[in-house]
Image (tube, rainbow, N blue to C red):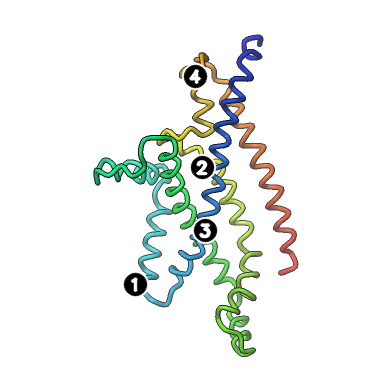
């Protein structure tokens, strides 16, 4: 116990640094994937068949393969196959590669949620808008989009919670997120080796952050109840 108390400040400091990296990856992914997913959903619903089929094939590939494989390909492919290591070897390069992989992966998942939400709005409302003289863009932003948001909040909430945990996969390309930081004390970090208890503390970070997100997303869902 005395040894743990001595190690505690060092471990917590390291876990805090790793958790900041996890938070960074989480928020960057959301900022990129939420708008990109909407764009991809438009492609998957396009009346131009080649674009619709191409978009759906890409979404099928991304959703049908592990995110870990996508991370490895995006990070290593340019350097090993194209002989153009665009990401570099530093932490910033690894973070950029992880961000690209996460954004594209989650945008494809979000696009299917968007598509379901948009197509779930009754067609008659669009026709009523056209009769009233509204343009299709006005109908989308003032009628369809608002109702779609209400429909997609529960499935989007699930994906966002999953994203928090999926950030741990970034350690496969040596991004120093919180799991990496906790595991480092098993191998020997800052004079500490063979210690497993920091890994249990990483779970506490995830639980607290997911708890906060669950409360916030639950409140958002309640605020959107007036669309029923």
Q: Residue at x 57, y 84 (%)?
A: 135
Whether tag 4 and tag 3 are in contact, CB under 8 A, the answer is no
| Residue linked to disc 4 | 189
Cα distance in 3D space between marks 4 and 3: 38 Å
Q: Above or below — where is 113 with respect to 7?
A: below
Horizontal and vertical percent for residue 111?
50, 61
Earlier in the chain: of badge 2 and badge 3, it is 3
Cα distance in 3D space between marks 1 and 2: 32 Å
Earlier in the chain: of badge 1 and badge 2, it is 1
Q: Quadrant of the N terminus?
A: top right
Horizontal and vertical percent for residue 155?
59, 56
Residue furthest top in the image: 2
Earlier in the chain: of badge 4 and badge 3, it is 3
Instruction: Specify the quadrant of the image occupied by residue 62.
Output: bottom left
Earlier in the chain: of badge 4 and badge 1, it is 1
Whether tag 2 and tag 3 are in contact, CB under 8 A, the answer is no
Q: Residue at x 55, y 52 (%)?
A: 30
Check disc 3 and report its element: helix, strand or loop: helix
| Residue linked to disc 1 | 50
95 vs 214, left or right, is left
Horizontal and vertical percent for residue 215?
71, 48
| Residue linked to disc 3 | 110
Cα distance in 3D space between marks 2 and 4: 24 Å
Callout 3: 10 Å neighbours few (<14), some, many (20+)?
many
| Residue linked to disc 2 | 166
Cα distance in 3D space between marks 2 and 3: 15 Å
- How many labels, in total? 4
Check disc 2 and report its element: helix, strand or loop: helix
């Amino acid at each position: 116990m005395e040894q743990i108390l001595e190690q505690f400040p060092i471990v917590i400091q390291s876990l805090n640094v790793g958790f900041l990296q996890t938070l960074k990856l989480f928020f960057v992914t959301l900022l990129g994937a939420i708008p990109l997913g909407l764009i991809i959903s438009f492609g998957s619903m396009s009346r131009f068949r080649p674009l619709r089929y191409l978009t759906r094939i890409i979404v099928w590939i991304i959703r049908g393969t592990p995110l870990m494989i996508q991370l490895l390909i995006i990070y290593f492919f340019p350097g090993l196959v194209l002989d153009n290591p665009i990401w570099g070897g530093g932490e910033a390069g690894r973070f950029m590669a992880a961000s690209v992989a996460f954004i594209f992966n989650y945008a494809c998942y979000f696009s299917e949620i968007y598509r379901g939400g948009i197509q779930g709005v009754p067609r008659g409302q669009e026709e009523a808008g056209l009769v009233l003289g509204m343009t299709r863009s006005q109908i989308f932003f003032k009628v369809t989009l608002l109702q779609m948001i209400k429909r997609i909040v529960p499935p989007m909430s699930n994906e966002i919670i999953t994203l928090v945990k999926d950030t741990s996969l970034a350690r496969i390309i040596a991004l120093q997120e919180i799991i990496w930081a906790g595991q480092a004390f098993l191998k020997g970090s800052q004079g500490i080796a063979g210690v497993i208890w920091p890994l249990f503390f990483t779970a506490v970070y995830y639980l607290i952050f997911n708890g906060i997100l669950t409360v916030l997303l639950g409140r958002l869902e309640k605020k959107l109840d007036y669309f029923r």
